[in-house]
Image (cartoon, rainbow, N blue to C red):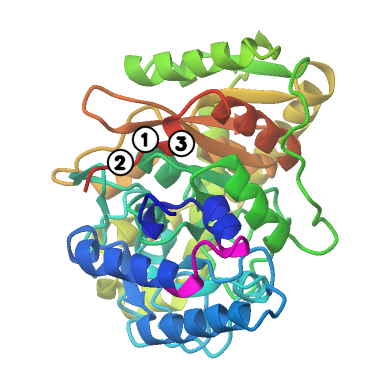
Amino acid sequence: MLTSSPHTFTLSEASRLIHERQVTPLELVEACLSRIDTLNLRLKAFLYVSRETALEEADYATKSIARGEPLWGPLHGIPVGIKDLLDVEGMPATAGSDFFRSRVASRSAETVTRLQAAGAIIIGKTHMHEFAIGATNVNPHYGPARNPWNPAHMTGGSSGGSAGAVIAGMCPAALGSDTGGSVRVPAAFCGLTGLRPGKGQISTDGTIPLSWTLDTVGPMAASAQDIAVLMDTLCDRTSSHNYSLDQPVRGLRIGIPLDDYFWMNTGTEVAGAVRAAAEALEDQGVEVCDVRLPDMDTVHRAAGLIAISDGAAYHAERLRAEPERFGPDVRARLEAALRHSAAEYAQARQRGREWRALLRGLFRESVDCLLLPTTSMTAPLIEGSEGVSATQQILSFTYPFSLSGLPSLSMPCGFDQDGLPIGAQLAAPGVDALLQLAHAYQSITDWHQRRPLI
């Protein structure tokens, strides 16, 4: 007999209970829709809810089980939220913008098709920072997404609606996109596990671009175990495999950057929680050592210049013809990008190559993974936040690892005195090590199991 409401289930729990016939897809979808009805007006996690279609698909999935038919896949009957940057056939596709307010997708993104082939039910399109050009999810066109731990605070962005929806129990998993940190930052601010995969590991087909150079699509859910299930579904066929989370982590080497860049302006509670996470992994036999990552300011600037220059190129005609339709912070960033020269862009690309070479050497010779804060602070207040400067500060620790092209993951590792989540970021050459380490950490801690009382 179930002792909790289906909206509290993680993806892995929901999948297991559906496979064991202890809960039906219809019960799960109805519970999530009820949660959306109760909370979405306040939190603005979803821009569009596919109520009728989700209920129809859930009913069909439930009846197929009752008929004794094989389940469609590991996500059979699981409701998933999709960031409104990714197309879902027949659903609105606004990218959080005024320009695309009336746009409806004519076909689905490759990632959405893969989810549906595995049995997932798309429950709706989640809120986001306008065109993904920002990290606050304070959107002038649709209002701000609000953090379920404290609605006066931001979710982070640009995939803030996806993170808010999952942690508030509106769906057990969601997709976001990550260019400079747009999966990892909301995961950190909302207390979830969020993965930026390696560049090219998951298709971006059907995704409205911010940066052709740095864009990725990534999943958000409660745990590394959930992320592994999603990655097995989402990865391109050439790189897809079953992630083995129970491999021993003893003997793996984790590097903690010593550089002031990562600690001088980081809150003491954040720094303490991340160092405590390192100690917890050390207790499981992981070797922890100090490393140096020089010139991080230039790496951060290079990543930001590449991303926003690509964005300015994509939006050049809109920026020329109707600049007033952009939100103030997005317009300011795009117009600033136009003032950069081709030489500066080339220099930024070269800095990226140097950074990647440095990391390849570090991972080959010294450590298997890096551990550092996802952000220097917990979720800031919405009121009084300024989009451009806030985004620059929020992405300080994530942008560099976007430029690396390597995968990185944020996992919850504590709370501050105000009850807001803290995220720790892992970066490694492969997703396997990230998921193994995150799973090992989550097997001895419960930060990823905590939910806001909202």
Of label 1 and label 3, which has the lower sequence position?
1
For this rendering, which residue is in front, 293 or 334? 293
Query: Which residue is pictured at 26% across the width and 61% down the height?
Result: 139
**What is the spatial separation of the Cα atoms under label 2 and label 1, in whole angstroms?**
5 Å
Contact between labelled residues 3 and 2, with CB atoms less than 8 Å apart: no
- Disc 1 is placed on an element classified as helix
- Disc 3 is placed on an element classified as helix
Magenta stretch encompasses residue 31: no
**Label 3 is placed on what type of residue?**
His
Contact between labelled residues 1 and 2, with CB atoms less than 8 Å apart: yes
The label number, if any, that marks residue 58 in the structure image = none
For this rendering, which residue is in front, 260 or 337? 260
Is residue 150 visible to us here?
A: yes
Of label 2 and label 3, which has the lower sequence position?
2
**Label 2 is placed on what type of residue?**
Ala
Query: Which residue is pictured at 76% across the width and 19% down the height?
Result: 252
Residue behind mark 3: 448
> Magenta stretch?
18-26
Residue behind mark 1: 393
Residue behind mark 2: 390
Query: Which residue is pictured at 40% across the width and 39% down the height?
Result: 191
